[in-house]
Amino acid sequence: MNRKRILVAPLDWGLGHATRCIPIIHELQKQGAEVIIGSNRNPLKILTQEFPELESCVIEGYNISYNRSGSFTKAIIPQIPKLINSGFAEHKKLKQLIRDLKLDGVISDNRFGLFNHNVPCVFMTHQVGIIMPPGFKWAERFIYKLNYRIMNKYDCCWVPDYAGNENLSGILSHKYPLPPQTTFIGPLSRFKKLEGLEIKNDLLVILSGPEPQRTVLEEKLMHQLSDMNLQTLIVRGIPGNESELKTPHHIKAVSHLNANELNMAMMQARYVMSRSGYSTIMDLAATGKKAIIVPTPGQTEQEYLGEYFHSKNIFYSASQSSFIFKNALNEIDRFSGLHIDISNNHLESAVNLFLNKC
């Protein structure tokens, strides 16, 4: 029997879209599919490091620029024509890839143009409703309708969350009606709880997200942590970049850890500090760790998730501009962390149904 050749293609904004594709690739392989990785820049580096044996191809990203002090969402609005053009370009690129790579199906993580009528295509997202910044709330309904139209071009829509009240994405996936072909596939994480490990670090810092804000937070943390006697491991979130970060003796910095190494580092840290991206929230749920989450400035999804989990006394959250680590450390023990079962039979069923269509 011929193995189904499936393209898995995450968006290149930050690392989370790539990391949450890791359990999808594992499930596809488990069910006998042949996976081809399609992305660019750091997401492509991460997935080819995790799966060096897999075929890969470059699919260019959307090349959205983001300044040091501005809002992420406001920066995107004037670049919408560029987004649309990039969507058309990747749609055209997919026609060529289907022919050249003999693809039987496509799984797109938030890439808008990777649909095709000749093979079954999946669109995966946790943002059915996109939160607009102050001053642009009037556009929220319009953006939702546009997003719905894009999702409706795909044969399947996957939401990595639970459908009911006990969910991780809140209004991002549960406020607006969903296309009829939508399936909640359960939270996705490359991590799991590991029992019996001793604590080696007081703090694990996981940096990620678009530049220059990744660097802004790194610099701020180095300034604040240098005078604190906390055994700290910083994972800088820059795979393939081996530039050295000068640190005091109680801080160790590495450019990147693979999934197994980072899983171990999380379980061996007393506390975790990270951005509040949705993929990170799923990883924290998988490990049950207490965490400090700092949204990328102006990224409304992360700001919402930070406020959402802080208000529920689950994770301590503060804005990047006002963040003071000593305050976070004094507060963190009154926050519970996430303790829900994310064992995932939903993904197995969704992948099986998809492969049967291919």
Image (spheres, grey):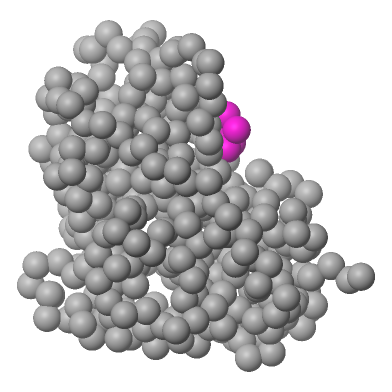
Question: Given the current orientation, which residue lies at the most extreme bottom position?
Answer: 117
Quarter holding residue 346: bottom right
Name the spot of residue 296 as percent of width and height, x first.
26, 49
Q: Quadrant of the C terminus?
A: bottom right
Name the spot of residue 237 as percent of width and height, x first.
45, 40
Give whichever of 278, 73 is nearer the camera. Answer: 278
Residue at the image position 34 percent from the left and 72 percent from the top = 128
Q: Total of numbered circles in the picture?
A: 0
Above or below 296: residue 173: below
Question: Given the current orientation, which residue lies at the most extreme right position?
Answer: 1
Residue at the image position 56 percent from the left and 75 percent from the top = 122
Residue at the image position 22 percent from the left and 12 percent from the top = 227
Name the spot of residue 123 as percent of width and height, x first.
51, 74
Give whichever of 273, 191 is nearer the camera. Answer: 191
Horizontally, residue 300 falls left or right of residue 261, namely left
- Visible residue check, residue 82: no
Q: What stretch is highlighted in magenta?
A: 257-261
- Visible residue check, residue 50: yes
Name the spot of residue 341 as percent of width and height, x first.
45, 43
Horizontally, residue 99 falls left or right of residue 349, namely right
Above or below 342: residue 129: below
Main secondary structure type of the part rendered in magenta: helix
Q: Quadrant of the N terminus?
A: bottom right
